[in-house]
């Protein structure tokens, strides 16, 4: 009888020890699956919002693999996916027989040589071969427009008529995106992978840099290692603690769009400017940027000044509505960062916009 009692007791003890182990084995993969499912759902939603319906999205951790049909543009798919928060790298396969776009062949076909663009608190750096002195001068002029009073141009460009960049446009969007914020950040292309590293001030800038990188080197893998700053622990009031989140929600819900070719806010968007002023007044200590954008109906030479006028017009109206003008920066980005296709009227209206975001390091 004692032996009969001890054996069930031992069995129960072993079972009790095994339960935590089994639960751990089940719950850890479940957590990973939840993260991957969330990234997959948000990536699919972002693609569908841009009209890409038939993409098969899969995640290994934060690394995306996307298979698209033969009529989809892999570069556009990569750009959209790279802009989804939490995505680290993107690989796109497309065509009737999917061919990975992660090799260096697409970049070689595009003729883009290895380069690096970076910024620090004191300088903007460009390291790249260019085909001529004219391209070198154009890059220098682009950087001059972006440099603040405390930054210098670290020019590391070299002239290589055979293998250099044919024009400054390849790096222009990257330069504008990286000029936002402070601290160290860089975009480096090694002939295969575009690596984004360093710190950016907010998620909107992170997505902007990702889109610009995908545009600069179509077909290359984009490895996004950009970091967002840890918010300082300051004694902010409740409205200021939630201000950045509420401003991001404002941009999502309320749109500020313009009449074509003008800096006049369209009738549907005028209440949005009033709403923006109300949001800004809830926290008077945080600086914000009004970013102006255009569609692609004009040339880049005319689009940039138009976008600057749009940003200035929104700032002027916010000041008229009682917001302190000293806390508002107005910048134009031309047609470099569309959020919709310029092939449709609705898409062009969406791209003729102004957006508001927090300026870090107040």
Image (cartoon, grey):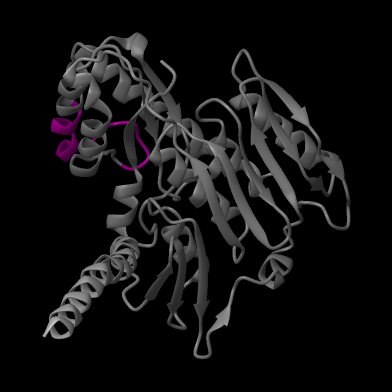
The image quadrant where one finds the N terminus is bottom left
Q: How many marks?
A: 0
Residue 205 drawn above or below residue 311: below
Q: Is residue 269 magenta?
A: yes
What stretch of residues is rendered in magenta?
260-273
Image position, residue 220 (x, y; %): 62, 63
Q: Does residue 24 appear left or right of residue 220 in this picture?
A: left
Image position, residue 143 (x, y; %): 66, 30
Q: Residue at coordinates 58% horizontally, 82% vertically from top-left? A: 99
From the viewer's side, name the closer residue of 236 and 331: 236
Residue 12 drawn above or below residue 296: below
Q: Residue at coordinates 81% horizontally, 52% vertically from top-left? A: 164
Q: Is any part of residue 249 visible from this angle?
A: yes
Image position, residue 362 (x, y; %): 41, 15
Image position, residue 41 (x, y; %): 28, 65
| Residue closest to the far bottom | 97
Q: Does residue 57 appear left or right of residue 63 in this picture?
A: left
From the viewer's side, name the closer residue of 120 and 251: 120
Q: Does residue 222 appear left or right of residue 167 in this picture?
A: left
Q: Residue at coordinates 44% horizontally, 50% vertically from top-left? A: 297
Q: Is residue 161 magenta?
A: no
| Residue closest to the far front | 1
Q: Is any part of residue 46 visible from this angle?
A: no
Residue 327 drawn above or below residue 213: above
């Amino acid at each position: 009888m004692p032996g009969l009692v001890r054996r069930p007791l031992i069995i129960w003890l072993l079972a009790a020890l095994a339960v935590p182990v089994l639960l751990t084995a089940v719950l850890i993969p479940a957590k990973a699956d939840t993260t991957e499912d969330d990234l997959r759902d948000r990536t699919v939603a972002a693609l569908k919002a841009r009209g890409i319906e038939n993409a098969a999205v899969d995640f290994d951790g934060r690394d995306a693999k996307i298979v698209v049909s033969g009529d989809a543009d892999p570069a556009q798919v990569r750009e959209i996916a790279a802009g989804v928060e939490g995505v680290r790298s993107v690989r796109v396969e497309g065509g009737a027989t999917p061919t990975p776009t992660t090799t260096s062949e697409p970049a070689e076909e595009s003729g883009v040589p290895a380069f690096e663009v970076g910024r620090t608190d004191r300088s903007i750096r460009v390291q790249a071969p260019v085909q001529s002195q004219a391209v070198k001068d154009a890059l220098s002029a682009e950087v001059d427009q972006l440099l603040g009073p405390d930054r210098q141009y670290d020019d590391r460009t070299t002239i290589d008529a055979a293998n250099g960049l044919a024009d400054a446009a390849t790096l222009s969007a990257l330069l504008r995106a990286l000029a936002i914020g402070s601290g160290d950040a860089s975009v480096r292309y090694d002939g295969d992978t575009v690596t984004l590293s360093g710190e950016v001030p907010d998620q909107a800038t992170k997505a902007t840099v990702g889109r610009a990188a995908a545009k600069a080197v179509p077909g290359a893998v984009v490895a996004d290692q950009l970091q967002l700053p840890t918010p300082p622990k300051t004694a902010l009031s409740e409205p200021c603690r939630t201000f950045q989140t509420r401003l991001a929600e404002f941009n999502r819900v309320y749109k500020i769009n313009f009449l074509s070719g003008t800096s006049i806010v369209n009738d549907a968007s005028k209440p949005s400017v009033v709403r923006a002023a109300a949001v800004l007044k809830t926290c008077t200590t945080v600086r914000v940027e009004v970013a102006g954008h255009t569609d692609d109906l004009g040339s880049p030479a005319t689009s940039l000044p138009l976008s600057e006028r749009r940003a200035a017009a929104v700032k002027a109206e916010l000041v008229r509505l009682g917001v302190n003008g000293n806390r508002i920066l107005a910048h134009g980005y031309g047609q470099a960062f569309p959020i919709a296709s310029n092939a449709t009227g609705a898409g062009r209206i969406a791209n003729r916009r102004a957006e508001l975001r927090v300026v870090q390091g107040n």
